[in-house]
Every structure is written in C-alpha cells, then in structure tokens.
Amino acid sequence: MQTQTLSRRPATLTKNQLPPYAVWVALGAAVILGAALSALIGFGIASFTIFTAVIFVLGATVMTWIVEGRRRAVDRFATYLICGSFLLALVPLVSVIFTVLSKGLAGLSPDFLFTSMGGMTGAVDNNSAETGGPVLGGAYHGIVGTLLITLWATIISVPIGLLTAVYLVEYSNGGPLSRAITFFVDVMTGIPSIVAGLFAAAFFALVFGPGVRTGFVAAVALSVLMIPVVVRSTEEMLKIVPNELREASYALGVRKWRTILKVVVPTAISGIASGVTLAIARVIGETAPLLVTAGFVNTINMNVFAGWMSTLPTYIYRQLMSPTSPTNTDPSTQRAWAAALLLIIMVMLLNLGARLIARMFAPKTGR
C-alpha cells in the first residue's frame, strides 16, 4: 500500500499543469493567426507583430485558465503581458532596421565609400566619358567629416565630463558649487540641438568674426550635447563603486587622487565606456547644429580648423533636399538611404568597441 501511494505521488504533483511545450504551441498559433489577420488588411511587420502579441497573450491566458485555474491564469497573464509588451517594443526597432537595410544595402559599394561628390553637376560625374561610364558619386567626404568632427567632440567632452563627475562624487560635499553644476548639467541635458549649434556659431563669430564655419566649431557644438551625458553616466558609475575599496586604499596609505585613478575609475570603467558610447551615439546623427557650424560641401576636407566640412547627416539632408538630377532615376535617394545605413553600422561598431574596451580595462576578478 505504501509503495502504491509513492508511485502515484508524481502524477498527483503534475496534475492540472500545462506541459512545457504548451507556451510554444500558443506562440506558434499566434504567429499563424497574426500573419493571417495582418494579410487581410495588407501585410506589414507592425500589424503582424501587434496581432501576434495580442493573440498570444489572450490565447495563452485562456488556455492556462482552463487547465490550471483562475489563480495561475492571472499570474501567467502578467508574465505573458510583459512578453507581449516586449514584442511590441521591438516593432519600431525592427521596422527601422528592416527599412534601412532594404533601401540602403544596395547603395553600399566601394565607389560609395571611397569617392566624393566633387565635380558633380548632374546625375553623373563630369569625367564620366573619360572613365568609360557614369560615376554616381559617394559619401567619402561625409564619412571623413563625421569621423573627424566626432573625434574632436569626444576629445573635448570626455575629459571635461569625466573630471566633472569625479569632482561631484569624490570631492564635493553637496555645497553650492556642486548643486549649481548639477543644475546646469540637468539643464544642458534637455536643450535642443539647434541651440547648441547656435551657441557655438555665435561664440566663434564673436571671437573670429561672423561667418566662421569649420569642423572644430561643429565639434564644440556637439560637445555641448555630449558633456551632460558623459557627466551623468560617469557620475552614476562612480557612485556604485563600493566605499570599502576606497577605504582599503586609504588604509594602505594611498593618496586620494591615486585611489581615484587606480581603484575607483578602473572599477567603473565598464560603465564609463558605455556612457561615452551613448554620448557619441547621441551626437553622431545630429544635423541641425552641423548645418550652422560646419556647412556642407562636395569635396574632401581633412582640416577641421579651416573650411567647411560635410558629414553624413548633412550629406543625407543635402541629397534629399537638393538632388543631383530632377529625373525619376536620380540616385540621390539611394545615396541618402545608404548613408543612413552607414550611420547605423558606425553606431553598432562603436558599441562593440566600447564593450571590448570595457572588457580589456575592467578589473580582473580571478586569481
């Protein structure tokens, strides 16, 4: 009798429970029904994802209610609702990536990456007859300008933002100066990008005269947008460093500045690198401040301190607003989509680089 009771206990514990594959069955059915409903109104990624998420949440909840009861159904409903909300949150991201890939991938070519728009007067190059075919121009000058201006903006912003965050966390005691810095950082976080461009243009116009447009002016404008992001992210990363590490360093007789340099900053380097990457991604696609500070040209300019410079955002704007040819076969739109895809790729590479830097400089946990 005891043996019979023990043999029946596992069956009793698993009674009125859905099998592990039930959720996947519900998801598969939701995908099929979502595709069918989306096809009725004209298939699209957005409508397909919305229908799939709603059907999955409702269907899985009802199935749980029937098999496991109301209490477990309410608990599962909250879980499924979070999963469905996650799917809906992916809709804009997937839609943007799919659209840019489908329209810009065909435009990426060696000619697009390593030629500029210099000498372009129409849909083809002036030298097309000599080269044996039409040369549609590329975005090399925009790529060079974007990299140089962003590099100088990073050189300006990162030291200022890092030192400001170190002062706020390590040296300030909540006095008037620290409160004023925090207030102005908060204000700078929300200013429109065009205001930063007008500030840089006005400042350099007062110093060097009106009409000054160079890559360095644009870098200063972008640094105004980058500094508050760097300050905030670095400040939060420094705050989460345990005080025990600082106290242990002080107990060994290490000075404060060296403790910050050798203990605090290396411990938080992963978050600091991520914050810098976010700041760069925040400004690399800005267009308005660059229009009033760097201008846009069709030729390559390697000197950020002299002459107008073109960047990928202004290149996209120029291609859409001033196409090289009024015909239906004008390649300007294709160039704009290819440049947009190139911007996304650059941001992705920046994120990967930040992760590699964080892994290289993070403190070692093993022995």
Image (cartoon, rainbow, N blue to C red):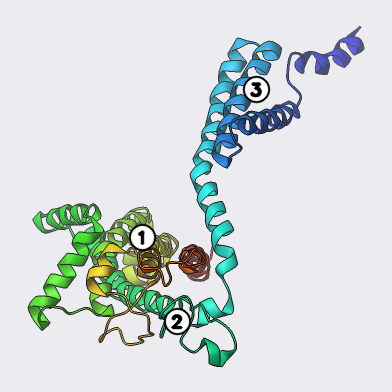
Q: Mark 2 — residue?
A: 116
Q: Nearer the viewer, residue 124 or 284?
A: 124
Q: Which mark is residue 60?
A: 3
Q: Which mark is residue 246?
A: none
Q: Mark 2: which amino acid?
A: Ser
Q: Is residue 366 visible?
A: no
Describe the element under mark 3 as helix, strand or loop: helix
Q: Residue 30: x percent and y percent?
A: 67, 29
Identify which residue is drawn at 52% across, 76% down. 112
Whole-angstrom CA distance, mark 3 to mark 1, is: 39 Å
Q: Residue 346: x percent and y percent?
A: 48, 68
> Is the residue 261 above or below the residue 20 in the image?
below
Of circles 2 and 3, which is in front? 2
User: Would you say 39 lies left or right of 353 here?
Assistant: right
Answer with mark 1 or mark 2, whichever residue precedes in sequence: 2
Q: Are marks 2 and 3 in contact (CB under 8 Å)?
A: no
User: Would you say 209 lies left or right of 132 here?
Assistant: left
Describe the element under mark 2 as helix, strand or loop: loop
> Is the residue 163 above or below the residue 131 in the image?
above
Q: Residue 350: x percent and y percent?
A: 47, 67
Q: Mark 1 — residue?
A: 282
Answer with mark 2 or mark 3, whichever residue precedes in sequence: 3
Quick one: label 1, few (<14), some, or many (20+) residues within 10 Å?
some
Q: Mark 3: which amino acid?
A: Ala
Quadrant in which the N terminus is drawn? top right
Q: Are marks 1 and 2 in contact (CB under 8 Å)?
A: no
User: Would you say 290 lies left or right of 348 here?
Assistant: left
Answer with mark 3 or mark 1, whichever residue precedes in sequence: 3
Whole-angstrom CA distance, mark 2 to mark 3, is: 55 Å
Quick one: label 3, few (<14), some, or many (20+) residues within 10 Å?
many
